Image (tube, helix red, strand yellow):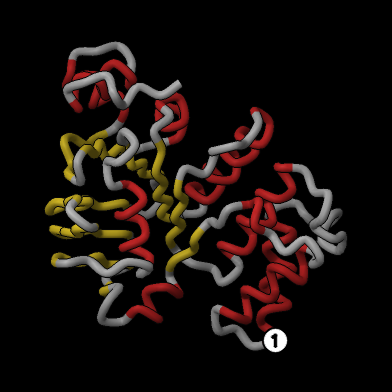
Amino acid sequence: MIEVIELEKKIGSVQALDKLSFKAEDGKITGLLGPNGAGKTTCLRTIFGLLQADSGFAKIDDIDVVKDSMRAKQQLGLFPDPCGLYERLTPREYVQFFAELSGMDNKSAQVSTQSVLEQLQMTDIADRKCKGFSQGQRMKTALAQAIVHQPTNIILDEPTRGLDVMSTRILRDLLLMLKEQGHCVLFSSHVMQEVAALCDHVVVMTNGKVVAEGSPQALCEQTQKETLEEAFITLIGSDEGLAA
């Protein structure tokens, strides 16, 4: 489980996070939904320890990310940009490298790498160089790197950005698989269809604050709207967040 409690973060003159609080539970997909500049990426970077909050704190499986950052990160998988793969490496080499980087010894890293390659049905491409991979193959390799150390929680920042339709569908299936395995999945997005299709729980953000949260259906009922997009517009009070 990921828990954010009263997070505040100022970047320059901008209050990026303003007493932000929410929970993302195990076995569920939680979406951070908001317009550009709402604070979604700042929030995720603070959870992962890439930014330090001015006040408040975040917990990963009840571990404070500042007080015990190494142990917290071991429970957290960060989905990287699939375009940033080391193209001269094979998926097996790439994933095992990150397994060892997370603290596994060589033998454990080999075993875990083989396991995750099988889990994601990647054995047919495991020993090919990443150069020339399709978007879907890159995405699977990136996800394998994120979960090879068997974290309980997965974070993704606008994961479908730049993906084609088929790659987006593959990613959705992978996230649903992680959910079924009991993982806590937290991702940010401003794409309504993506959030409505995947999320059990939605946290609507604007100006660094939570303005509403609940299931997509509950948010529609709260605002008396038929679609999540219409509910979102009502909740943030403008049409600036409308995504194409």
When asked about the image quadrant of residue 217, the answer is top left
Residue named by callout 1: 106
Residue 100 at x, y percent in the picture: 63, 81
Vertical placement of residue 82 versus 99, above or below: above
Visible residue check, residue 55: yes
Vertical placement of residue 52 versus 18, above or below: below
Visible residue check, residue 21: no
Quarter the N terminus occupies: bottom left
Kind of residue sitting beneath label 1: Asn
Residue 181 at x, y percent in the picture: 51, 53
Residue 191 at x, y percent in the picture: 43, 29
Q: Residue at x 23, y 26 (%)?
A: 219
Give SS at disc 1.
helix
When asked about the image quadrant of residue 220, the answer is top left
Q: Residue at x 13, y 58 (%)?
A: 6
- Is residue 92 toward the left or the right of residue 30 in the image? right
